[in-house]
């Protein structure tokens, strides 16, 4: 297969879809790879390293879009890339389509095969291509939240850990999956009081075993959320229903009951967000204040730490990308339900059920009926 990788064009996005080591693996497996000039520079990988690994460096990204069988990226394609879509192109990246109807329609119209990192699900239910970025975003959420609690940003001016003789901050984590667990780790490490809410009792039990008495676990119900956030200094949104738009569990009416200057970091924003008042922000302009509550809703948080993020992400994506390249997409899907679970659109149809169910006027087609 001919594999391609272009430079990310999203605001402050410095990650890259392939490292020179990844290129070597594709080349050793008999594929060819072309990389846009300077695509890896933000993550510390030079064109020379890619060339040494066997890639061809191409100046014009349009040339790559037009010629490859599979494009490996990090973030979803942006509007200016839609005209480059073409039938049969395999696009292997994050999409988060339930939160982006326009992009989904463009992929369907272009008959692009979208292989979504965020829905690829192993048999044990884990999301191995979402996990590395969720680990980073979860840890970062506390770091960013602690920063925006500073008075100069509109925060209430409380130090997460406090000092002897002062109260520690209360951190409430909505959703105890990968983001939530990593947020707990850092918040507990910083000495805050931590409460985590999830709908899964099994997950709460795992968290209880992991953190013991250092956290409070609660079942995620409207009333438990409302009571918890009233006293919160920092709320982390980490709820996910794979492939679907996120339930808005953090309601607008709670904001007025909360402490003015408390901070809400909605990590789940890329999938639509779990706050009624959430709208996506960028690293350039990451926060806004609504009803006295500082909202931080950056959709590509790991992009701020591209070196760590690129290595973590590509270590996970390589093996499935190679499987698709080696077998061809159809055979790879026919032989592996794990690969098939990543296919969101194929030949102009929606092939991921939760995605089709997210809109009232779309329908689901079983991938098996198409390949
Ligand atoms: N903004 C960013 O840069 C960034 C980076 C990485 C991940 N994310 C996003 O963070 C979100 C969480 O990802 P994850 O990997 O932790 O997912 P996960 O599947 O590991 O965890 C999600 C958790 O939410 C729980 N949940 C579902 N409905 C709930 C509800 N009503 N109340 C409370 N909990 C509920 C699930 O039981 C699960 O434990 C996703 O939307 C993901 O795309 C964003």
Image (tube, grey):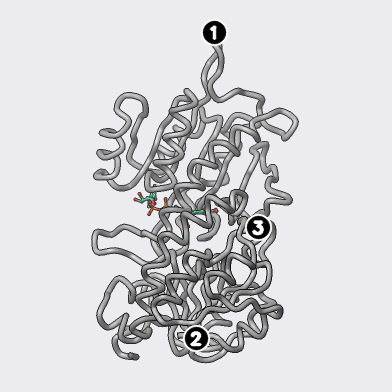
Q: Which residue shows up at 58% across the image and 76% down it?
A: 103
Mark 1 close to ligand 1, CB under 8 Å = no
Q: Secondary structure at mark 2?
A: loop
Q: Which residue is mark 2?
A: 69
How far is the residue under mark 1 from the one under mark 2?
A: 62 Å
Q: Which residue is mark 1?
A: 165
**Can you tell which mark lies on residue 281?**
none
Can you tell which of label 3 and label 1 is closer to the viewer?
Answer: 3
N-term-proximal mark, 1 vs 2? 2
Q: Which residue shows up at 57% across the image and 41% down it?
A: 264
Q: Is residue 211 left or right of residue 288?
A: left
Q: Which residue is mark 3?
A: 42
User: Percent from the top left, x then y, of residue 257?
Assistant: 57, 33
From the image, which quarter does the N terminus lie in? Answer: bottom left
Q: Which residue shows up at 56% across the image and 13% down it?
A: 163
N-term-proximal mark, 3 vs 2? 3
In this rendering, is residue 62 above or below 208? below
């Amino acid at each position: 297969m001919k594999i391609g990788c272009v430079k990310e064009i999203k605001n402050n996005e410095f990650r890259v879809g392939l490292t020179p080591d990844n290129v070597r693996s594709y080349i050793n497996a008999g594929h060819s790879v072309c990389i846009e000039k300077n695509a890896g520079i933000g993550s510390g990988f030079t064109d020379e390293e890619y060339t040494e690994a066997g890639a061809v460096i191409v100046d014009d990204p349009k040339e790559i879009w037009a010629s490859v069988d599979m494009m490996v990226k990090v973030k979803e394609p942006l509007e200016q890339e839609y005209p480059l879509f073409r039938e049969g192109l395999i696009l292997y990246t994050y999409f988060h389509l339930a939160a982006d109807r326009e992009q989904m329609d463009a992929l369907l119209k272009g008959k692009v095969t979208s292989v979504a990192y965020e829905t690829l699900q192993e048999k044990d239910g884990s999301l191995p291509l979402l996990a590395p970025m969720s680990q980073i975003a979860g840890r970062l959420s506390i770091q960013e939240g602690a920063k925006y609690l500073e008075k100069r940003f509109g925060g209430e001016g409380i130090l997460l850990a406090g000092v002897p003789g002062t109260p520690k901050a209360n951190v409430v984590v909505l959703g105890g999956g990968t983001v939530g667990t990593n947020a707990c780790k850092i918040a507990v490490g910083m000495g805050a009081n931590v409460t985590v809410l999830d709908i899964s009792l099994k997950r709460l039990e795992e968290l209880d075993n992991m953190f013991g008495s250092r956290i409070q676990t609660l079942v995620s119900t409207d009333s438990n959320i409302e009571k918890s956030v009233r006293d919160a200094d920092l709320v982390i949104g980490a709820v996910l229903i794979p492939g679907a738009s996120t339930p808005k569990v953090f309601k607008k009416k709670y904001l007025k009951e909360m402490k003015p200057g408390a901070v809400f970091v909605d990590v789940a924003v890329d999938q639509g967000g779990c706050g009624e008042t959430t709208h996506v922000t960028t690293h350039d302009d990451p926060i806004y204040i609504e009803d006295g509550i500082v909202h931080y809703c950056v959709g590509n948080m790991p992009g701020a730490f591209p070196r760590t993020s690129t290595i973590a992400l590509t270590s996970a994506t390589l093996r499935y990308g190679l499987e698709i390249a080696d077998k061809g997409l159809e055979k790879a899907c026919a032989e592996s339900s794990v690969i098939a679970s990543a296919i969101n659109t194929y030949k102009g149809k929606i092939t991921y059920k939760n995605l089709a169910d997210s809109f009232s006027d779309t329908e689901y087609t079983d991938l098996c009926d198409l390949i």
